[in-house]
Image: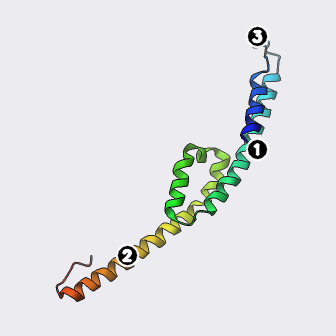
Amino acid sequence: MYEDYTTFYQKFAGIPYDCTDPEDETYEEDKEKMLEKVGDIDKRLSTILCEAMDDCHTPESIYKLILVLGPIVDRPIIKTDFDQKYPKYVRMIEKDLEHIKVMTLMTMTKLLQMTGSKVGLN
């Protein structure tokens, strides 16, 4: 993917344009080709990134993936696909928080049973 983009960008950057000729439409045509190529690369990248998120099995691994990707996930094509993956992430966090809540209540109950004193369960 990187080589495809680099090759296409070098071709685009190497094309001479006559900026003084308002009738010359070649720049606009080439720009559209470039944007189309970037869109294609974004779609392929989006597929790879969504698969990477599907392969993450813990909230921390998803967090690290999002952190590493940074602004890449804000690209419009990628964002559309990637945003559909966030509910999975939220459910994983909710599950972990529920597990923490149960563990805390169990620990507090055991502590209460061992000491006989009242410990705030709020």
Q: Quadrant of the N terminus?
A: top right
Mark 3 in CB contact with mark 2 (< 8 angstroms): no
Q: Residue at x 78, y 13 (%)?
A: 18
Kind of residue at badge 1 = Asp
Q: Residue at x 22, y 87 (%)?
A: 114
Q: Dot 1, how many residues are within 10 Å of its Cα: few (below 14), some (14-19), or many (20+)?
A: some
User: Front-most of 47 and 64?
Assistant: 64
Q: Dot 3, how many residues are within 10 Å of its Cα: few (below 14), some (14-19), or many (20+)?
A: few
**What residue is shown with label 2?**
101
Q: What's the distance in space between the residues labelled 1 and 2, CA to CA?
A: 45 Å
First-in-chain label (3 vs 2): 3
Residue 17 higher or lower than 122, as above or below: above
Q: Which mark is residue 20?
A: 3
**What residue is shown with label 1?**
40
Image coords of residue 4 (percent x, y): 77, 38
* Horizontal side of residue 103 vs 120, given as left or right: right
**In terms of secondary structure, where does tag 1 sit?**
helix
Q: Which mark is residue 114?
A: none
* Horizontal side of residue 100 vs 91, given as left or right: left
Kind of residue at badge 2 = Lys
**In terms of secondary structure, where does tag 2 sit?**
helix
Picture quarter containing residue 105? bottom left
Q: Quadrant of the C terminus?
A: bottom left
Q: Nearer the viewer, mark 3 or mark 2?
A: 2
